[in-house]
Every structure is written in C-alpha cells, then in structure tokens.
Amino acid sequence: MSMQIKSDSPLPGLPIPEPICSDVPGTWAYDTMKRRVNEEILQRTYEDNKKEWESPKFQSILKRFLELREDIGSSGQLKMLDALPVDAPEDRVKEWNEWNQILQPYLDKRDTWLSAPWLVTEFFVYRKLIEVIGYWDESSAGYKYDPFAKQKQAGLESSVGSAEPMLGKIPNLPKTSEGIELAASIALWGNKMDLSIWPADAADASVDIFTTILASASDNLLHDDFDALAGYCGKLRENGGGHIDVIVDNAGFELITDLALAQHLVESGIASCVTFQLKSHPTFVSDALEKDLRGHIDYYKNLDSKKFPNAHKAGVKWRELLDTGKWKFNEHNFWVQAFPMWEMTEPLRTEMKERCDLAFVKGDANYRRLLGDCMWDLAAPFDEVVGNYFPTPICALRTLKAEIGVGMDRKQIERAKQLDSSWMVNGRFGVVHFAMGAKE
C-alpha cells in the first residue's frame, strides 16, 4: 500500500515488498475476508447485540449493519466513508481525512474487499462498523456504544481463575535479566497458556516453577532476543528507570498479563513510568480501549480478597500505579488505522522519539503493521526492516496468527513446518524481536 510519505520519514532498510491481498484462495487472508469476517465475526457481533439492535431505537443502525454485511459478503467495491456534517469537530474531520487518504488509491483502482491490501480491508471493516453505529455521533443511539463490550467483559471475568497464581508471583520476580524475561514471556504467551495447571502455592514457590511452566512455550520461539532485551533493560535500571510504552493488543487475560509486565517494569526499576498506547474506538473485537483497561483494573481491585487474594492485591497495586502517575494512558487514532508503522504521524513519532526509551509492541495486528503487512522474506533481519525506522528502541512480542513475518531462523521455520501445517496462523509459535530503532 502506498501513500505520500515525507521525504525525511525513516523507512525500512530493505526494499519494501508487495502487500498481502485477500484474493488468493487457500490463504488466511482470503479466508478472513471471504468468510470469517462476515460469517463469524459480524455474525457473533449481531448475536451479542441482537436484543438492543432489534429495538426501535436501533432500527436504522441494524439496517445499515445488515447492508455492511451484504457488501462485505458479496466482496463489493470499496467506498469512501460517509460525508461528515458541516459542523463536525476538527478531530473527527482529521480522522476522516486520514482514512480517506488511506482508501483513495484503492478507490481509484475500483478495488474490492478482496482485491485491496488485507491490512486496509480488515481494519476498514471495523472503521465502517463504527460509522454504522454512529460511535462518535452524539445524536446517534450508538454514541460511544461498544459492540464488543459483552465479549470483552466475558474475557475479563474468565481471566481471574487463571491469573490468580501468576499475579501472586509477579511482585517476587527478581530484579535481574531472569525477571524481565519471565515477565515478558508471560505477556507473550499469556493468551495461549493454561495457567490453571499452576500449583495452588505458586505465589510462594521458587522461580523454577515459572521456568518449568514456560519451558515448553519457549521451545516454540522462532526468534529469541530475550538476552538483548534484558541487557538493555538492565541499562535502563542502572540509569534510574526509563519511560516505557506498551502498545496494547487484546483485552481480557492478555491485557492482565500486560499489566503484570508493566507492574514488574516499575517495581524492578526498569521503568519510572509506563504509558499504555490504546485504541481510540472498538476494533478487532477484543482490542483494548482506555475504558477497558480502567475497567480491568477496577474489576480486579474489587474482587473478593479472600477468594482471589493475589488478583485483588494486583488490582489495588495497579490503581495505585495509575493514581500516582507511574502508569499513564494514551488513546490515539493511529493505532486503529491501516497505515504501516513507518507512516506514523509526525507529531506521534516526535513525541515518542523524545519521551519513550522502549516500546513493547504486542500482538499480531500491531506486528503486521510493523511490517506494513508486506510479503517479506521470513528470515529478513528485524533490525533492518523495523529497527531502521521505528522511533524508539522496540521489543515486539508476537504469537503468529497471520502468514507474515521476519527475523526467523530458517532451521526453526523448517521445524515449525514439520510440526504443524498451520504454524503461521494458530498462535502456537512466537517471536521475540528487539532492536534499538531510529531514536539516535
């Protein structure tokens, strides 16, 4: 995907390949845009909101929602966002212009939901859903209505039992390279690990229990930069702690593991402040907004201290970190737009470059944007692709859920292929990448 880039904007250090499109049968991208989005994701969204949407109040929203499903289901031609009212606030006009800037090259070519780049179309599904709902329209029944709230709440409530033993251990992690590796490993594998297998006294057990539990998962790392990450974090600690960002992915248990990582970063002295970079509107079903993160903290804080003592204590601690300014939030439209990360808006790039000492980038969709959702050689060095342009030192924690990647060892790739034919899309395998970025 291409758009106007300022001549001084840093780019990947290797020639940029073609983006992944969704018009090749048999690929994950094709199955996503041809079937999964409409038949699974939007169908589940309808079922979760059926009671509200079939009421007279939501009649027009339901009509537009069904029209959107029909358009996507028939692989219709992409269309511009609806025009804004003449009195729309400046921030909405800016966001509208940015999205239409993304879309314009594909509108000019009369691309469809399948033929345009996958990054564009998949992100655009959720932007169109927000438009259908009237999420930013104060006169709409759907003003600030989150169609994924029920799914996220269910994920939050189901997270507690698994998180309880883990959260008892986090405060006792050593202030060493082993501590940050374990905390980051939990954040990496959190949504794949069944922590219910942990012994009831795990909070009081040695670090060896952590190591044992994570060992099988670490066998599925296709690239491991934990040593480089730990070395850099050690320098931050020696210098009194840095400003660290967590570019968040999913709510629910995965977000709880992100909070656990952020807690360790502060308590170990690696971070003096952690900023959570969050989505500005509901997207990708489970992606976290500021209200989700605040809701997770309050939910854990209010848990029964006798039934879930570790989770309750964690919630109290997280609220303290928030209230004392050691944790901060930033919702930004860039995190929900289909720009490659190298097209980061200049104000955000400058702000991060000047303030942030390390960014943890979580999840598959964020990782795809780091690569521009392009068809890179799987063994292309992460440092040359991402480290060449990203404005800060960066650690990407990603379990593979799309047919894209860089920086993987070729022998590990072959091993993964032999072990699992769906190795690139089912989250079984992961990568930990670290690069110093273009900060200097």
Image (cartoon, rainbow, N blue to C red):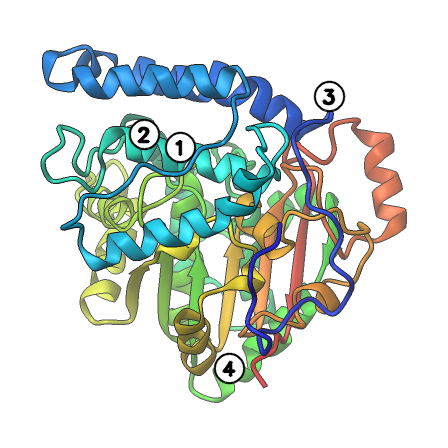
Mark 3 packing: few (<14 Cα in 10 Å), some, or many (20+)? few
Report how far apart the C-alphas of labels 4 and 2 lie in the structure.
38 Å
Question: Label 1 is placed on what type of residue?
Answer: Val
Residue 275 appears in the picture as rendered: yes
Asked if labels 2 and 1 touch by Cβ distance under 8 angstroms, the answer is yes
Tell me whether the residue at label 4 lies in contact with that at label 2, contact meaning CB atoms closer than 8 angstroms: no
Query: Mark 3 highlights which residue?
Result: 25
- Give the labeled residue for mark 2: 148
Q: Which element carries disc 2, helix, strand or loop?
A: loop
- Residue 344 spot, x, y in % from top left: 49, 64
Q: Residue at x 10, y 18 (%)?
A: 57
- Contact flag, marks 4 and 1 (Cβ < 8 Å): no
What is the quadrant of residue 402 in the picture? top right
In this view, the residue in front, 3 or 208, is 3
Q: Is residue 231 above or below residue 363?
A: below
The residues tagged by marks 3 and 4 sit, at their Cα atoms, a distance apart of 47 Å
Q: Residue 430 carries which label?
A: none
Q: Which amino acid does label 3 sit on?
A: Pro
